[in-house]
Amino acid sequence: MKIGIYPGTFDPITHGHTDIITRSLRVFDKVVVAVAPNPSKHPLFTLTERLEMICIVMEKMKQVEVTHFDGLLVDFVQRYGGHAIIRGLRAISDFEHEFQMALMNRKIAKQVETVFLMPSEEYSYLSSTIIKDVANHGGALTEFLHPEVARQLQDRIRSLKI
Ligand code: ADP
């Protein structure tokens, strides 16, 4: 069974992430969504909240497991018995950073491959950062987020403004 590990901050999960997971399932038998705490990115949602939202979005996708990891990603991939790291590539702007990370991960663990998948064009400009900006300015979120994720994001932003 081929297992792909999809790491990220997922603050929060968007349709862009879901698109990558759906595509990954055409290549892998199982996809493990591995949430990194990433405190240095100052996430809007706690690790537990991010995990819970992903579980809600992935509820019907039986070949998807949701978990979190600390420390080096390649250590987690090897411990889990994953066959490759999955990353999404949006525009050229993602490339440099992703290329650097993939090569560093390969340097640390040469048997761990990274696979890049491109999202559907409609999500190619979507990121968790931009969606938080849209939400902050009261924009519509329904095209980009699962309704429950949209609700939680609006609630969080409202509570921060009080
Ligand atoms: P990280 O902090 O690791 O970049 P993110 O949650 O922002 O965490 O992204 C996780 C992965 O998902 C990255 O590979 C990122 O490029 C990819 N990704 C995020 N949004 C999209 C999108 N709209 N389309 C394709 N890939 C995406």
Image (tube, rainbow, N blue to C red):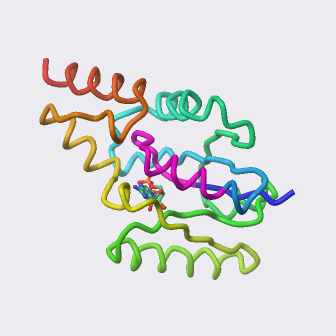
Classify 62 as above or below 121.
above
Residue 88 in the image, given as x and y percentages of width and height: 49, 63
**Which image quadrant for residue 157?**
top left
Measuring 44% from the left and 45% from the top, which residue is drawn there? 15
> Residue 13 in magenta?
yes
Measuring 28% from the left and 24% from the top, which residue is drawn there? 156
Magenta range: 7-24
Number of callouts: 0
Q: Is residue 77 left or right of residue 99?
A: right
Residue 29 in the image, given as x and y percentages of width and height: 79, 54
Residue 62 in the image, given as x and y percentages of width and height: 73, 36
Ligand 1 lies in which image quarter?
A: bottom left
Quarter the N terminus occupies: bottom right
Quarter the C terminus occupies: top left
Looking at the image, the residue that sits furthest to the right is: 1
Classify 159 as above or below 39.
above
Classify 130 as above or below 143.
below
Q: Is residue 158 left or right of residue 16?
A: left
Residue 129 in the image, given as x and y percentages of width and height: 29, 49
**Which image quadrant for residue 26?**
bottom right
Measuring 59% from the left and 31% from the top, which residue is drawn there? 55
> Residue 99 in magenta?
no
